[in-house]
Image: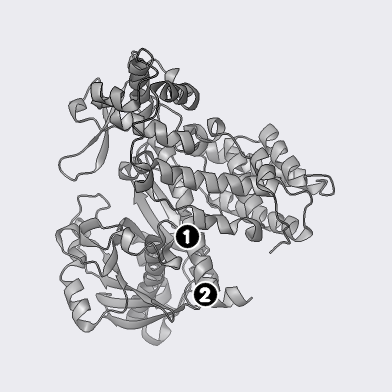
Amino acid sequence: MSVTTPISAPDVALYMRPAAEVMRLARMGCGHPTRLSFLRVMLRRLECADWEIDRPVWKVDANGVGHGVYRVRSAERSYSLVAFAHDLPPEMRSDRVIATAWDATFTLFDGEPTDADIERLAQNVPYQETGRVTSKELTLARANRSVRLFNHVVEALSEGRQPDAEEIRAVGYLMRTTAVYGSGKFGASDRIYIADRPELAAPFQVEMLTVWLIRAFTVDIVEHIAAARGGVNAVKLDRATRRSLGVGNSTGLGMAPFIVRHPVLLNNWIMSREEALARVRAQRIADPQAVEGLETALSEAVANAAIWHSEHPVQRDKLHGLRRDLDQLAEALVGWNWDGDLPWNALWLWGEENLGLEGQEALLSLMLEPHGGLVDDLADHMGADEAASFRINGAMPVEALRHVLETAYDWALEIDFSTPENNARFWYVSEEKLEPRLGERATEDGASLEQPLCIARLIAELYETVRTFDGSAPVAALLLSHPEHRYAVRRAQIAQSHPYAEVRDNLIAADMLPIDLLRCKLAFFGASQFDPRSDRWVRINLFAGAPFPDEIKQEASA
């Protein structure tokens, strides 16, 4: 870890990127995981604290059916992933949300389950939404095999050989999750009851722990089935191959509205990342160890970009640009002057001048990587007490509200919503699965069920009312006359003190790409190998390259 010196808040503020630059969909859709991504935060906590990780229960038959328990414990508390492996007929295997059966189902249990707990969970967890879980369960998840690769690995290991490296690289995971639910879903514990635990303070820590332990299960299950088939001839995955495997995930529109509905949380995510970049840029000198770390991170990014493939035309173009940008960055670093004043800021300014959006956001990730001592504390500020900002300030003068709209939402007031292309879509919730959907206003019914996710249009409608309303009157009077604007007023008051709270684009425009919203959120999770299958759903990889439970303490002491 590099040597760092304190940097004053005013110095950091000089290097913060403005929301007008950061919060546009085109840039948000080029996000890359960083050391502040939630899975990285979770792994660092496991590495540095006194957590012990083992698998006390493994009752799985030769066909790979049964259950196991993965335990993570410290002196204070324990968490246990209870994993159920099923015999799923091929015709029932589906990644769609309407599926009713899966190859494996999971729950993260708060503590260590008894036999009675496991029996109860076995009667409920495999049924997911139609089962019942309790406040002792923190998450509910399911996964399906990547059938071709899963079978190939089992066959190879059972015959005493390693699987084909190209097959591994082409897929990158043995199973993919189709849902990982937390925060009170289907009876599981609400986050409010666990948020004060230090290890869970950062967002989505129980979900990340769940997926990381699922990754261990995916390797254990293939090695178990291979050993049952091959007997003494069977072998285990070699460490390099095992390490390259992650957990896949299929994510659709259901995730997209989240960052719109949680403006304070979004602000805190972006604010933390942007302050991290600003801290790095504000350094007066470059520590040689940090420069070496940058070069190592760049080599890893180049290798990752080389194996990152997608058939989606938008993502193909982005990948072409990313590879070009990384090569250009590598050439620039060969003769880079690290002895000048503010060398990290000079590198960033060079990137803004010479790299595309993909390359710039990749450079952000690379610059943070060797500066853990400077930026890692920001992970503790990425959560949010959203209830604190929910109350509307009714005493605020309408004139002050008008000023907020004209300054913080000038981008929204420039959009002409009378044109078909700017009012082309509508967000709604399907009656069948209560999942978000995106409809085409001109050709589909359902606009009457539209959800308030187009913040730009709501703000424009509010402004039309506000600009002719008595400016000296309080907001309470405005809302008494026009209660339909309560939601927009609350958003505006939040944005007043949270500059990164809003996506500064029209979310119902004809050319809006929902995958940009998905990638922004998934990058904060720590997802890699972002692979859109349409403009509305993607496949990703989580934890590829990360340590396994039996390796994490070795790495911490290395």
What is the distance, in whole Å, between disc 2 and disc 1 at their CAs?
Answer: 16 Å
| Residue 66 at x, y percent in the picture | 24, 76
Q: Amino acid at mark 1?
A: Leu
Say which label, 2 or 1, has the lower sequence index: 1
| 557 relative position to 204: left or right | right
Please tell me whether mark 1 sits on a helix, a strand or a loop: helix
Quadrant of image for the N terminus: bottom right
Residue 45: image x %, image y %?
Answer: 51, 68
- Where's the C terminus, which quadrant? bottom right
Task: Quickly name the residue at label 1.
Answer: 39
Q: Is residue 518 left or right of residue 23?
A: left
**Taking the image as drawn, is residue 303 in sight?**
yes
Q: Specify whether residue 310 is in view.
A: no
For the point 58% across and 36% down, which residue is it? 357
Q: Secondary structure at mark 2?
A: loop
In the rendered image of this protein, does residue 440 appear above or below residue 56? above
In the rendered image, which residue does mark 2 sit on? 49
